Amino acid sequence: MRHARCLLFANLWFAACAGTPWMPHVPRSATLPRAAPEEAAWFKFPDALPADGRHELPSATAAAIQLAMDDFRPRHVRLPGNASPVEVCLNQRQSYDVRTSPMPEGILLVRFSVSPGACMQEGPVTDMGATYAVDTRAWRILAVQQP
């Protein structure tokens, strides 16, 4: 019985790793959109990141933004087929600008607001943003404030 469990574990382990290069610091996910290798072949990385337009975020800020965004606009949400173009736009992560502000005790405020010019319609788009209080010590969402 012990041998069977080891074999089962080994098969599951190898199946999970099949087709994915071993990179412990960069997990691969089948759910993230990726260009086909032949489509991406033309792209060449520069030797260094260009200074023009470069932004640097501390790692805790980047992680807090991702944690809040995963709650604010989860990737797995699918809109009904009759959703309006504005509803579709407001459901897209790229429609939002992000501001962060540190607070005492390792709290980071993360504010999402509709990007100017996004989700065009007749009249102003109601602010569909939110502000998150993220505890960067325990990596949890403390509170959410909606307009």
Image: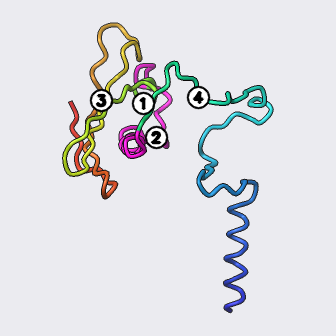
Number of labelled discs? 4
Q: What residue type is labelled 2?
A: Val
Q: Of tags 1 and 3, which is closer to the observer?
A: 3
Image vertical order of residue 54 relative to residue 143, above or below: above
Examine the rendered structure and indicate whether residue 140 appears above or below residue 58. Answer: below
Residue 131 position within the rendered picture, expressed as x and y whole percent measured from the top left: 26, 36
Q: In which quarter of the image is the N terminus?
A: bottom right
N-term mark: 2 or 4: 4
Snapshot quadrant of residue 23:
bottom right
Mark 2 or 3, nearer chain start: 2
Determine which quarter of the picture holds residue 68. top left
**Which of disc 4 and disc 3 is earlier in sequence?**
4
Q: Report which residue position mark 3 lands on.
A: 129
Q: Quick one: label 4, few (<14), some, or many (20+) residues within 10 Å? A: few
Q: What element carries label 1?
A: loop
Tell me the residue that label 1 is attached to: 91
User: Which element type, helix, strand or loop, lies under badge 2?
Assistant: loop
At label 3, the amino acid type is Gly
Closer to us: 94 or 41: 41
Q: Position of residue 26 (x, y in %)?
A: 60, 50
| Helix, strand or loop under label 3 | loop
Q: Distance between the residues labelled 4 and 1?
A: 30 Å
Q: Farthest residue to the top: give it.
A: 122
- Report how far apart the C-alphas of labels 2 and 4 lie in the structure: 33 Å
- Mark 2 is surrounded, within 10 Å at the Cα level, by few (under 14), some (14 to 19) or many (20 or more) other residues, namely few
Q: Earlier in the sequence, mark 4 or mark 1?
A: 4
Q: Are marks 2 and 1 in contact (CB under 8 Å)?
A: yes
Q: Nearer the viewer, mark 4 or mark 1?
A: 4
Q: Residue at x 68, y 62 (%)?
A: 16
